Amino acid sequence: MRLLVRMRLSESRADSYATFECMVIRLSGPLTKPKRGGAFLHAEVILPVQYRRLALAKDWTDEGTYQVEVPLQFNRKSLAPFLASGDGVWIF
């Protein structure tokens, strides 16, 4: 599944993100609703080559995928089946 995702660029700055479309390998709930910003889910993705130099080391998984946020506002239609299912995790 391809989704528009958001990748943190800095641990010290909460507003430092890169947004891009990529292939999602694992989608995880529940929906996170922060006080600031929009609601999002967590996902593990195949990180595009052009973003690898910006990646934070702690967000890599043992499987070689990268952890990102999936904003609901940009992916509402694509995420509707996952949210309606009530499942905690989908693996693609």
Image (tube, rainbow, N blue to C red):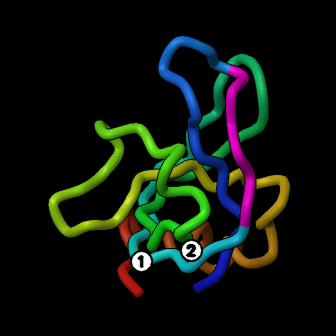
Q: Residues within 10 Å of mark 1 (few under 14, many from 20)?
A: some
The residue drawn where x is 45% and y is 73% is 46
Out of 41 and 52, give the one closest to the viewer: 52
| Residue farthest top in this picture | 12
First in residue order: circle 1 vs circle 2? 1
Q: Is label 1 in a helix, a strand or a loop?
A: strand
The type of residue carrying mark 1 is Ile
Cα separation between marks 1 and 2 = 14 Å
Which of the labelled discs sits on residue 82, or is there none?
2
Q: Residue at x 48, y 20 (%)?
A: 11
Image quadrant in which you'd find residue 9: top right
Quarter the C terminus occupies: bottom left
Image spot of residue 53 (x, y percent): 49, 49
- Callout 1 touching callout 2 (CB < 8 Å): no
Residue that label 1 marks: 25
Q: Which residue does the image show at 62% across and 15% down from the upper left? A: 13
Tally of numbered discs: 2
Numbered disc 2: secondary structure:
helix
Task: Give the magenta range.
Answer: 15-20
Mark 2 nearby-residue class (10 Å; few <14, some 14–19, many ≥20): some
- In the rendered image, the quadrant that contains the N terminus is bottom right
In the picture, measured across the screen, residue 9 lies left or right of residue 71, that is left
User: Which residue type does callout 2 highlight?
Assistant: Phe
State whether residue 24 is above or below residue 42.
Answer: below
* Residue found 74% across the figure and 52% down from its top: 19
Q: Which mark is residue 33?
A: none
Q: Where's residue 36, x and y in %?
A: 75, 19
27 in magenta: no
